[in-house]
Amino acid sequence: TPRYQTIAVKRDIPRTIAMVLKENAANLPGVVIEQDYRRRYPLSDDIQSLSHVLGYIGRVGSCELVRQNPARSWVAGLLDSIGHAVECGILQKKINPYELGIPRYLNDDRIGKSGIESSYEEEMRGQMGIEAVVVDTMGRPVRAAQVVQPTRDGESVVLTIDIELQRKVELILRNWINEAELRRVNMPERYAYKRNYMPLQSGAAAVIEVNTGRILAMASWPSYNNNIWVDPTRADELANLLNPPPAQKAENQRLAPLTNRVISGQYPPGSTLKQFDAVVALQEGIIGPNTRIRDPGSLILKDQYVEERFYRFVNSTPRDNGWLDVTEALMRSSNIFFMTIAGGNKEGVVNLNPNEQTIPQGLQINRLAEGLSTFGFGALTGIKLYGEQPGRVPTPGWKQQVLRAAWTTGDTYNAAIGQGNLETTPLQLAVAGAAIANSGTVYRPQIVRAIIGPDGKIIQEVQPEVVRTLDFDPAHYEVSRQGMRRSVVEGANIAAREECSGILIAGKTGTAEFGPEITAKNPNGVGTVVVRQSHSWFLGFAPYDKPEIEVIFLSEGSGDMNDGSSTIAVPAATQIMQAYFGIKPPQPLPAQCQQGMPPLPTNSGEEIVDPIQRADLRAS
């Protein structure tokens, strides 16, 4: 430790002890009583999902000290980077010749570890002061200290989060996760195998402004209370979170309460992807708005490499849909239609007549992947929050490199319906969905609205940032929007209909399979069936005629809980929209609407306070 740099040996000492130590300072050389501060997150006790957004602070680590502190010299900076490359990863050492030798962090300092605390550490930290003290050989001051560098308070950040909406979104998310779990444990005997699913306890939801990219609410569940990181009296809770008892360890890893699923969870998006397929296929000329494709309920595909081997690709609800155009296909969520426009329905397909094989090639995977990538899939959205994941848009090159296997038409079919190896984050879906709602502008999602200086004046107002403007015909977005509107008005998503919700909503459900195959007793007859568990999704915007917000809702594992996408994800997202617009559902609900739903959360009536506070702890 550098000379004269203090080390904390005890924190939060009582005032009486501090006074005794100060009175006996002459007999305790080197012992210093210092004023400290403690972070508080007053809203996180009631709204735990804020913890993922705000993050927390913790004691600065050795690698953070090396990375953040300016070098003592150019040579020392180079040696630090080389010497810590293995332990700390590749360092980008800050070497500012005007700051050489002046550390920004001391050994006992705290630093942002996640969330806003980490992403905006530079702005919120401020600058520590330096005093020069002349001492004698006994280390006693011989003259008054001189200020070499004055202290500077950190800046404040104003979030885009609407705290009342955030509270309601979390409650809605938790209510519908609980509803899904109730369905699982009470599943009728014919579906008894579903009772053996792992408990349904996880999900995510977000609200984003269509025309700015600002995030108004972001909830991931399970969550945690970030106060346990900064409150010494709750050390046991923190220890239990980080190192749970052996009996709880596997459950803790499965639920991952520290993970912000909105930005870090990577899932198959299922049929929510079809709205993007439609725009890409229209742009590439594979189909027109009135092109009709035969959907017999399944496509039987001959193996490209093994004779006498066939694969059956089906709709999620087995039925013959006849001839469909693109808006009808979105309304019915036809897997066959979107598989066809992606991979064609001629080569290898054995269950269609020649006159029904109207799309010989389709997009094929490279054009599909390129189109999806322009919407932002397979890449970071650029939100300034630590831990964002990129998702994945698989390609033949990826499959060969990672799985050591050749690409097949079946892989293209699966990718087109958001299955197989394609994965997205909920935030990616929300950002891409907003681009369809606003006719082609991809915004960088933002969580901070403004940065405020110590004097209370605005230093920077964060403006909407356009990442790219998509080069698609605006008419194609309108076709996709019409299909999503039909999905609500004519499809199975009755909770979102105007007479039930009071809002003009358009959107797309998704039932996305995941995990291992399960062999279960056939609920519709004799023998067995092979099934997989699935997630429930809904991605939608409102109002339909003048979009303001895009809502994404995910309930993990509930896709086959009585059509979870239409009866869990849709009503949940609808309630989120009602919370945003301040619209209450009709009372009583019309008979044709979904009944028995969890109640819509009401306003808390509580005074809104700062989500982050710094409480000074004074010893005298």
Image (tube, rainbow, N blue to C red):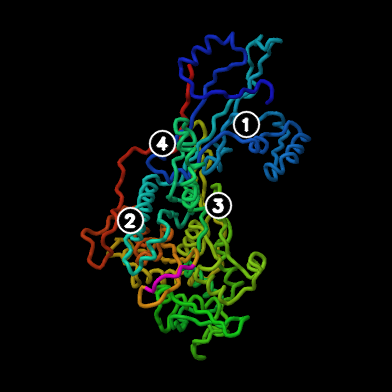
Labelled pair 2, 1 in contact (Cβ < 8 Å): no
Element on which disc 4 rests = loop
**Residue labelled with disc 3:** 388
Q: Secondary structure at mark 3?
A: loop
Give the CA separation, mark 2 to mark 3.
Answer: 28 Å
Q: First in sequence: mark 1 or mark 3?
A: 1
Q: How far apart are the two marked residues, 2 and 4, measured between alpha carbons?
A: 27 Å
Q: Earlier in the sequence, mark 2 or mark 1?
A: 1
Asked if the residue at tag 4 contacts the one at tag 1, i.e. Cβ–Cβ closer than 8 Å, the answer is no
Where residue 570 sits, quadrant-wise, is bottom left
Q: Of callouts 2 and 4, which one flags the residue occurring earlier in the amino acid sequence?
A: 4
The answer to whether residue 464 is above or below residue 352 is above
Tell me which secondary structure the magenta stretch mostly adopts. Answer: strand
Q: Which residue is mark 1?
A: 105
Q: State which region is magenta.
A: 517-522
126 or 429, which is in the foreground? Answer: 429
